[in-house]
Image (cartoon, rainbow, N blue to C red):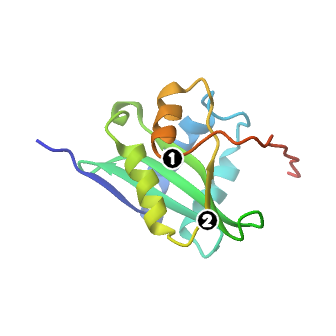
Amino acid sequence: MEKNINIRQMKADDRDEVIAMMRVFYDSPAVIHKSSDEILMRDFDDCVGDTPFLRGFMLEFDGDAAGYAMVSLGYTTEYGGVCVWLEDLYIKPEYRRFGIASELLAYIEREFPDAVRFKLEVEQENEPAYACYFRGGYRMSDYGLMTKENV
């Protein structure tokens, strides 16, 4: 029997499920900064609210919540167009290796057909994720990433 992967926009009704997955993701070694519950709730609210800069997606497998993703939108002057940054991608352990992440990468490209660049961060020790992104056409950048937090 073929398994059904569905990707859809987050809705306000997804709040409890998404916040629970976000907490697991943000407490994992995949994330350097452990965000507060207040920040996670604000992120969710922005995904389902009116901000034009952040979009949230539910990842479903056979009708069950299997994960979530969040993308932020910006502009890249280097390539002269919209840049889509895959901020969060979390798939529950029991749903990994079913092609959900690969399907999400293709979905995001279809969802943002005018984007000139897609970006994401990956922990290099996470070999399955790295391999998935590589198969999806992503490559390691030669740029170093520098940040300054003002929170």
Q: Is residue 125 left or right of residue 69?
A: right
Q: Which mark is residue 137?
A: 1
Q: Is residue 101 left or right of residue 33?
A: left
Quadrant in the picture for residue 32 = top right
Name the amino acid type tagged 1.
Gly
Name the amino acid type tagged 2.
Val
Mark 2 neighbour class, 10 Å CA radius: few under 14, some 14 to 19, many 20 or more: some
**How many marks can you see?**
2
Residue 10 seen: no
Residue at which label 2 appears: 116
Above or below residue 60? Residue 114 is below
Q: Which element type, helix, strand or loop, lies under badge 2?
A: loop
Q: Position of residue 125 (x, y in %)?
A: 60, 23
Disc 2 + disc 1, Cβ < 8 Å: no
- Mark 2 or mark 1: which comes first in sequence? 2
- Which is nearer the eye, 48 or 15? 48
Q: Position of residue 91 (x, y in %)?
A: 44, 40
Residue 121 seen: yes
- Which is nearer the eye, 98 or 36? 98
Residue in view at x 43 percent, y 66 percent: 110
Quadrant in the picture for residue 115 = bottom right
Residue in view at x 88 percent, y 47 percent: 148
Query: For the N terminus, which image quadrant?
Result: top left
- Which is nearer the eye, 12 or 139? 139
